[in-house]
Image (cartoon, coloured by chain):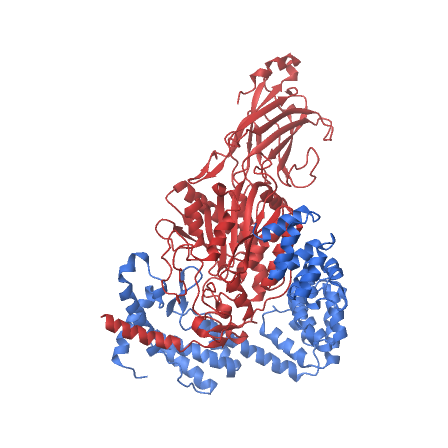
Chain colours: A blue, B red
Amino acid sequence: MARPASFSLLAIGAKVSHAWLPLDCDHWTPRRLLPFRSLLRLACAAALLAVAAESRAGQPLPDSEAALLAMVVAADAKSGDVAPVEELKRDVAAKLGEIGTAASLAWLDAAAKQSPTVTVKELGCRAWFDRAVYPFDQEAAKAAWHIRQRAALDVYTARDDLGFLEEVAALDSSAPEVSAALAAIAKSGTGTAAKAAGDLTGGAPNAPHGNTRSLLLAEAWATAGIAPNAPELALLSDAGALYLLRLSEKFPAAERARLLAAARSHAGIASAAAFAEGRPGGLAVSAYLARDGATAAAVLASDGSPAMTAELAAALGDAATARHAALALMLQATAEARAALDEAASNVALDEALRIDIEGWLGR
Amino acid sequence: MKALSAIVIAAALSSMAGGQTVNAITSGGLGYAVPMPVNSLTPVAGFRSQSALNSRHMALALEKDFITMHAVGTSIRGTNIVAYRFATAGTTTPDGTAKGAAMLQGTIHPREWISPEVVTAVFERLAAGEDATARFLVDNLEIVILPIANPDGFAVTQLFPAQTVGGSASGGGGADGRMRRKSMLNADDFLSTTGDAFNGVDLNRNHSFGFGGGSGSTTGETYRGPSAGSEPESQALYAAAALLNESRLRFYVDVHSHQQVYYSITDASAARSAAVIDAYGIMRSVTIGISGRIYGNLPTRVETESIGATDEYFAGTYRAMSYTLEARPPSGELFNGFILPDSQVDATRRELEPAIAAGLYYSAGPASVREVLIYDTTDGRSESSPLVFRQARTTQVGGATRILVTIANGPLRTTRRYTAVIRFTKPMRERDTGSGILRAFPGVSTTAAPGISLANVANGAVPVFVVDGGGSIFGWDRYGGDTAVADFDLRQSVVPNGVYTLELSGTDLAGTALDADPRTVADWSVTGWTGWDAGGVDALTGVPILNDTTNVGDAWLLLGSALPPR
């Protein structure tokens, strides 16, 4: 690409500044360099422009996988300015992630192991660190993952059954084949999914499942629309159980209710299931607080209405529910709730430790 | 020059402004599912929601008498900022020394969602009090935890977990929404109003000791605010510290992400700075022992390199061992290190909570021998085994010194067998839940057993730490692992009558050697540890031994006054 000569000069400046200046230098200047902040700003701005000028953003890439691969192989072979090469590799990797096939994997896998050399200072949490301007390595890894995921999905969906799941269950949960298997399960029929769920639990029915098997089971149950019972659910990994809970909306209402009830026996999602279930219809505030404690308090607090505040204030009068009623009022944090807590803090009938906590929350 | 500068800057800013649109953060951009907050009081395989975390903290505080909650201020929008104080009653430890004070803080930068998870993990462990270390910490320190220091900003990140202003599909380079870093000063909840997306104060640049290190621009990502401590959230932080005995504040950790590193704040005091690095080394080792992840160290001198961050404030104001802990990942591991995948949340909690607990443990001071008891167990150990010798270290009023009180009911005899019970001021070992073996903190290399020897007396003593059987005279005392027991047999010895020095050594859970002379109580000061006597061998105990085979008889006891005067 032809570009103005001035930009080439600026690009040189950018390369120098990349080495030690954050582009956004107005936000950060070494204390000893404060007297030169204006000059630094100028250098930063120049660097920004130079980067923009060097960018090949917007230029179309060929649609052919072979042509894309040929481009990057040729670019890699050239010596000279590395920035355009790294940018090209990033863009080609991204495109191969969309259209690539197994033919691209060798290049993508190799690129994923390389380290970009063109970096820019980026603000982390506390300090600036070097970030790749063109993170072609990460883009290549992602692209290779997508190609493998697509290839696996093609194979899986071409089959009439889900008999491949046992093999997939042995893989790491981040493997592309696992993602493909989950998608294949979701596309299968309820009967097929139900059979798959049975197969996946059949080997060792009482042994805790690994993470991948748990995810596959969750997807199979959700697709089949059949909630597991509590002992079955208890065998899922925490991540698998949470995945199942996130799929709970896919279940028919009655099955969802069964699922949420069963989920309360799984330590990894018991509380989340109680949140998801919410306050059962017809259950009085005090009864709900007595049953679900802090979870009930949090659920009730999401209703900030004066009517709810009044009910919670009333529940303060019962020793069995006072603590969690107070918690709900604190979480509500409305003016009415504060007033109720203020009154409770001076109520000597309330437990002293609770009054101390209420006073603390009120900032006294 | 100025004109050229203005033109170039204007051009540059104009190019940046073009990117100020509301952008989606996608799983495609991140390379993994976009994390969504989960309503759950207890930890899940992902991030909990702000309301769930609030509920969790408050519920535990209401449940446990040793946790009290305190509204320490309100945010710029009037949201309560709540700190929690963990301490058993009284200002002294069970040993009679003055309690130290420590503080943890999280979520000052809202987009760093792992921060409240890590801080809450420490909160939950201390609240549960199910292990010896947790109980020791609550008994021996005052600890304040401020889990959510920037509640307004955190709320915005959770309101828009998959959106940001500017930036890419990974959220990288974005501001506001999921990527908000600053407070909500002059900012609203609507991402569509992008004009305020860059407003707010970086609450980790708003403090004295280096104030000015942040940006002076109100839209700068590190805008420091108009003056040191100007923001209500900063005032709340100071009020949280004031819940403690501030003169005894010696440990502070501010949890952030990301870069997998500790910023350790050193100063002109070599001794204090050495302790800062020692505590870092312990925390680092624990994490390596758990996950193999290596957290680096970036020492920062408070006098010359401060930027107005909270760790510098606590180091400069209180001379505490002070850290900014940046959680995983290291730079370059993910497209956007601020958005950790759900799959890494639990692992991060597990590798950092024990590390922080180990830092707190170290900050409580060195272990020392609290009591030595020797029972005659010639007929085997039993609850009625006769006590022959006892030496206790009693803390004097004021807590700075201890006296050694010795009771000898008779000499040890060369025809008998004995069991020594050595009680320490801290839990010294814990049981690995996987292997079942006794060990120090994960990753801390140390000798398996304490040392016990009667100088010049062969006795075959092999001490073993006790983590089970509390309540027995041969079991642990206050905390599992605070006691070592050694059987020894004086029948192997041919020694003249006399008083023999009992030498005791050992390392604690953090691999730290004993305070060799507990008569001067080790304590933290502005220049580091004081009264922490080096050498690690406590040789203050003198044990009378009677050589029965010479038939001198019990008249020897009249020599009891020859016990060491110290």
Near-viewer residue (A136 or B456):
A136
Question: Along the horizontal axis of the image, is A95 left or right of A316?
Answer: left
Residue at (56, 42) in percent of width and height: B141
Q: Quadrant of residue A282?
A: bottom right
Near-viewer residue (B508 or B174):
B174
Near-viewer residue (B417 or B565):
B565
Q: Quadrant of residue B341?
A: bottom right
Question: Along the horizontal axis of the image, is A221 left or right of B297?
Answer: right
Near-viewer residue (A280 or A226):
A280
Report the label total: 0
Residue B28 percent location from the top left of the image: 53, 76
Residue B146 percent location from the top left of the image: 54, 53
Residue A196 percent location from the top left of the image: 72, 75
Up/down of B130 relative to B96, above or below: below
The quarter of the picture where the N terminus of chain B appears is bottom left
Residue B201 in view here = yes
Residue at far bottom of view:
A63
Up/down of B207 relative to A52, above or below: above
Question: Along the horizontal axis of the image, is B96 left or right of B416?
Answer: left
Residue A333 in view here = no
Residue A201 percent location from the top left of the image: 74, 69
